[in-house]
Image: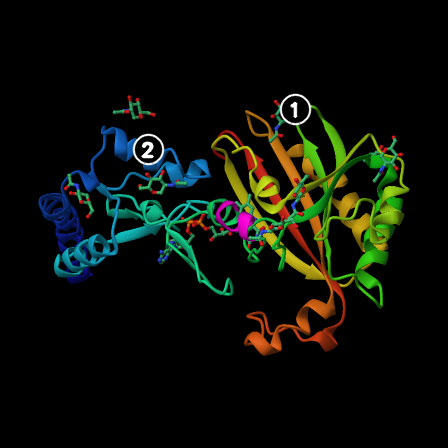
Amino acid sequence: MKIIWAVSSCVSAVHAAGVGTCCTRLHSELGANVSFLGEPAYNATENSYWSLQEAGLKPGCIVRPLASQDVSRAVSIIAATAGCNFAIKGQGHAPAAGFANIQGGVTIDMTGLNKTVLSSDRTVVSVGAGASWLQVYLYLDPFNVSVAGGRNGLVGVGGNLSVTSLVNDISQRGQVFQAVTDIVSSANFDIYTSLVVGFVYNSSSKAWIISNSAVYTRPVLDPPVFAELAAVPSISNSSRITSLAALANEAATPPLNWHFATATFKPSTQFMLEIFDILNNTLYSFNPSGGVVWDVAFEPFPSVMLSHAAKTGGNVLGVQPEDGNGYSMYRCIITTGLC
Ligand SMILES: Cc1cc2nc3c(=O)[nH]c(=O)nc-3n(C[C@H](O)[C@H](O)[C@H](O)COP(=O)(O)OP(=O)(O)OC[C@H]3O[C@@H](n4cnc5c(N)ncnc54)[C@H](O)[C@@H]3O)c2cc1C
Ligand SMILES: *[C@@H]1O[C@H](CO)[C@@H](O)[C@H](O)[C@H]1NC(C)=O
Ligand SMILES: *[C@@H]1O[C@H](CO)[C@@H](O)[C@H](O)[C@H]1NC(C)=O
Ligand SMILES: *[C@@H]1O[C@H](CO)[C@@H](O)[C@H](O)[C@H]1NC(C)=O
Ligand SMILES: *[C@@H]1O[C@H](CO)[C@@H](O)[C@H](O)[C@H]1NC(C)=O
Ligand SMILES: *[C@@H]1O[C@H](CO)[C@@H](O)[C@H](O)[C@H]1NC(C)=O
Ligand SMILES: *[C@@H]1O[C@H](CO)[C@@H](O)[C@H](O)[C@H]1NC(C)=O
Ligand SMILES: *[C@@H]1O[C@H](CO)[C@@H](O)[C@H](O)[C@H]1NC(C)=O
Ligand SMILES: *[C@@H]1O[C@H](CO)[C@@H](O)[C@H](O)[C@H]1NC(C)=O
């Protein structure tokens, strides 16, 4: 017992010394591309995390490489220094604390490596390790090509697409869920469909709404695939033809605490209604100061999507086209205070 204790104390001592030594070496090698607590560059990285819980970690120093050689020099120093732990940050969107930041280690912020280059035959795009999807979309738009990147995972969109945002009263949930179920279960799923249907509860307004993002990855207004959804009376709706870059260019959310969970289910209106009832019977007693928002969203996961996976190596969850149509559900809890 004593020995274990001695070893772990020793490890912490080396760890603490390692970070200081490591940051000093990094600074002498990479100059102002290494920043420390209290400096504007350090703050700029800390303030660029999407979630509050990630931004709350304080690394001993932050390295911001501007060339790939800087990365290899930084990694060589880190690897040669005992007890120097590090984290890598891209756009900082992964919500959990410690995914892309580190308490008392070295954070390498890759966002300075953002160069994007399209091959002359327009079939391959090389993207810097720290670029955002928006930068990639903006770069590619004038070439009328695109890639399946973040936010909706739109496949093969060059040029324009159709976007409809609909808000329904929660009392319309039966009709909305039925429309989603019918879209996901269709024997001829329209592959240009991208749909997110969610119900949202905000403890400040104490109100539920249903919000739908119905995107069609061709420039067609009111595509037939969304007809059943569009027929449900709505509180607001907007339809427009726009580009992928404009769609993905969402306003940044303020730093908040986010907790995500996800699961995949067979299409079922009844089950969606039961999920709502369970929430409606359980969530009001969770009332942290600063308020809480619950967001439960459904996205079609049709088997036709899986049928394309085999030729690109299968999918990581091992789901097969024979498993049939489904939808994935994600549940997100958002708070401003710690909970
Ligand atoms: C609001 C929101 C919407 C989203 N929508 C979509 C979507 O539509 N489609 C989709 O696919 N995903 C979506 N995501 C998930 C998102 O794509 C992932 O969280 C992604 O990992 C974020 O990348 P990042 O560079 O911003 O995050 P970071 O937090 O910077 O990085 C994510 C992880 O990758 C590691 N990493 C980053 N860069 C490197 C590198 N160069 N070398 C080695 N490791 C590295 C980090 O250490 C970290 O563990 C969404 C997330 C949010 C919060
Ligand atoms: C930061 O890195 C760049 C690219 O390697 C280098 O040109 C520049 O001199 C570095 N800045 C300082 C202050 O060392
Ligand atoms: C860094 O951010 C902190 C808190 O957000 C602020 O108090 C401080 O003045 C900032 N420092 C610099 C150098 O920007
Ligand atoms: C790309 O990185 C460079 C170097 O840090 C920076 O000046 C530029 O603003 C970045 N581009 C974008 C679109 O963020
Ligand atoms: C992209 O599409 C537009 C509209 O169809 C066309 O005018 C333009 O020439 C195309 N650009 C390229 C690089 O193909
Ligand atoms: C996309 O739509 C805009 C107008 O809404 C138009 O100016 C542009 O040419 C369109 N681009 C393509 C590639 O069709
Ligand atoms: C919740 O509602 C309040 C009051 O209407 C609003 O200020 C806040 O932005 C909402 N929160 C979210 C995460 O939408
Ligand atoms: C949006 O509202 C208008 C008028 O209120 C209606 O004509 C149109 O069909 C609606 N579209 C959708 C997609 O709900
Ligand atoms: C939530 O549950 C309460 C209590 O059972 C019920 O009165 C209310 O109508 C439900 N809310 C909705 C939107 O159905």
Residue position marked by numbered label 1 in the rendering: 204
CB of mark 1 near ligand 7 (< 8 Å): yes
* SS for callout 1: loop
Q: Is residue 153 left or right of residue 168?
A: left
Instruction: Tell me which label, 2 or 1, sits earlier in the chain.
Output: 2
Residue drawn at point x = 60 percent, y = 44 percent: 332
Residue position marked by numbered label 2 in the rendering: 44
Q: Which range is magenta?
A: 138-143
How many marks overall?
2
The x and y percentages for residue 260 are 56, 48
Mark 1 crowd level (few <14, some 14–19, many ≥20, 10 Å Cα): few
Q: Nearer the viewer, residue 319 or 14?
A: 319
**Residue type at numbered disc 2:** Ala
Colour scheme of the rendered structure: rainbow
**Residue type at numbered disc 1:** Ser
The x and y percentages for residue 207 are 74, 28
Q: Quadrant of residue 82?
A: bottom left
Residue drawn at point x = 63 percent, y = 55 percent: 157
